[in-house]
Amino acid sequence: MKSKKIIGIISIVISFIYIILMLVFEHALGIVNDQNRLTIFLPIAIVIYLFLSWDIIFDAIKKIGHGDIFNEDTLMVIASIGAFAILEFPEGLAVIALYKIGEMVEDYGVNKSRAEIASLVELKSYDARVKDESGEYIIKKLKDVHIDDIIYIFNGEKVPLDIELLSLNATVDQKAITGESLPIEKIKGDELFSGSINTSQLISGRVIKENKDSTINKIISLIKEATSNKSRSEKFIGKFARIYTPIVITIAFLTFIIGSSIPPFNWAYYLEIMCEILVISCPCAIVISIPMAYMFTIAKASKAGILVKGGAFFDEIGSTSTIAFDKTGTLTEGNLYVSEVSNKTISDEQLESIIYELEKNSTHPIAKALTLKYTNNPTNLELKSIKEIPGSKIEAYDIDNNYYEIGNTKLLPKDFAYHSDTTTVVVLKNGEVLAIISLEDKIKTTIKKDIQYLKDSGFKNMYILSGDSEPIVNKVASYLDIENYKANLLPEDKVNSIIELKEKHKKIAYVGDGINDAPTLANATIGISMGTVGSDVAIETSDVVITDDKINKIGYIKRLSKLNSIIVWINLIFAIGTKLTVLVLALVGIANLWIAIFADVGVMILCILHALTIRYRKVKW
Amino acid sequence: MKKTYEFEGIDCPNCALKLENKLTKIKGIDKVSINFFFNSIDVEYSSDDALTKLVEICNNFEDGVKIYEV
């Protein structure tokens, strides 16, 4: 501990000894009289006072020199000297002693807050290991490492940049990104995020993003922006602080001046009131504790892999009880696969050739699913004039001018009865059905439990919005116990639905993948994107980015938001309420300096400790 | 135009608030945002003189307060 701090603590202890002794001598033992008060107790009090307050007096003088006349230090010195002037020595010492204790608690809170941020920033790296011309390892600063460079990471080291894995496999800890410490297996070609830790042997990777665009730097900037992006409460505090202090100081001095100049010129009485009011003139309790609360909340969320763009969004999430989900990729894994082939009238090889040739150049998710199963052209079928008609089908002709189509069930002949609750693709030749292929999209494994958790966390109304057909969406909705859903939605329908639901429910959260549903995310009260930490589009358009695909984290963020709101509101009401109460009590003459000191320092200490609890409270997820 | 500085020596959020208020009043400074937890000052400005004035005010704000470019 610094010597200044030790001296400070000693002086505070000595002050309290004096205060207690003086109070006992005066009130319990009655041995203080007008004479020894001035000849013994006063000089001792002055010596202790100077020992206790010399640094504050110096700071006050320096600040006045800089033009900052009515700062907290000056006011406390005036208040304490005022207390001495009306012969209340214990109170005079207590003003400064408790003020200093308050400052220590404030420093503790500030240090804890900054340590929080430091632990996040620690996840950054500053250099990377590359090989020079002779094959020796050298360390290069990150600004000198470029895309396509190859870097090497030893066991236990942080991955410094986003890379494509060149080693056959690797195991990483992605805690910095997703908040979870589970070992993740990666294979050659996979992306490794900067900030993750290599828990396997030496690995090498090809740099795919420069340092300034790396995932960990993006996360850190988001958090920094989030702490700067002030919520309504924080903005209110800024404005409040600017007017509160001058007004209260003015009231204090006016009370003294006016009160002392009217008969019976009782200046001592009004001096005491002035001191009481000066003591509560600093709104420090809320100026410090509320931004601290938001900061701890933002940091806590980011440690769970949830990036919230600002304190204001926590407020909104806390008060939003309606949520709409995109289906594919959010509630389901988004990877279609062939689950069944029916009504097949040709051989497997013939079917494979037809489907492969039709779909091989398409980038549609259905094409991806089909070409996972149908990978070849065993019959050497030749197709020409291949044309993809979005939303409908792919068509082509073979050398004998047979007309092939592959598309949705609208292609089926009118009298062909077929019902399904899964995505269905039909293959036709000259208008006749060759095969009907059912594709499934797996529901995420823990999703049923997760949705229930969200309901328990406070999301009372739930909706599913999907472009898939009614039976498919219905199946998912009933499995998850979600009563409301809208199917067959085109992208603009999704946007309109969100706007409509927002009007109905006042506030609505929307959960999507962040890439394909930008406008919908933008129109929701809270746009939540999942699993897309790397995507600039997602970060731009959503208010909350969840770096993995765990739906239960939405429940976590709701609970965290409620916790934050409670702490902020209690601090605000407690601090402002107490100060105003003491102000009124002082003006009508029924307060005393002890009450004023508590209303200032006591309230500040409690508010800071209260905000600190966010750091330590366990919120389930 | 934008610029970011880092500062040291301000340990009281109230002081950071006071500094922010002071800096916002400089002519040529369009927006100032002091992030107390990250020790950073983000400035949007329209004249280089305003920046010089801003640096001067910060360094004279209180004893031990220094700002530097990132």
Image (cartoon, coloured by chain):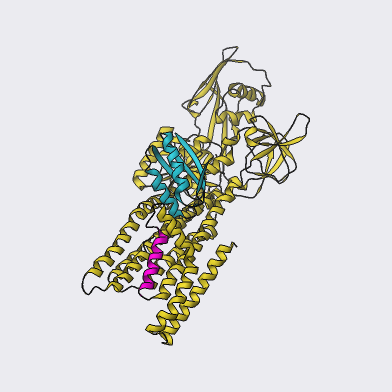
Q: Residue at x 59, y 12 (%)?
A: A400
Chain coloured yellow in this rendering: A
Q: Could one spot residue A128 in this view of the protein?
A: yes
Residue A531 picture quarter:
top right
Which image quarter is the N terminus of chain A in? bottom right
Horizontal arrangement in the rendering, residue A589 relative to residue A158 (left or right):
left
User: Residue A484's spot in the image, x, y percent?
Assistant: 42, 45
Horizontal arrangement in the rendering, residue A424 relative to residue A63 (left or right):
right
Per the rendering, the colour in which chain B appears is cyan
Q: Depth check: A549 or A387 in front?
A: A549
Q: Depth check: A536 or A605 in front?
A: A605
Residue B28 picture quarter:
top left
Residue A359's place in the image compared with A176, above or below, is above
User: Residue A336's spot in the image, x, y percent?
Assistant: 58, 35
Q: Depth check: B3 or A66 in front?
A: A66
Q: Residue at x 55, y 50 (%)?
A: A117
Which image quarter is the C terminus of chain A in? bottom right
In reply to whether residue A229 is colored magenta, the answer given is no
Q: Residue furthest top?
A: A400
Q: Depth check: A315 or A140 in front?
A: A140
Residues shaded magenta: A67-86
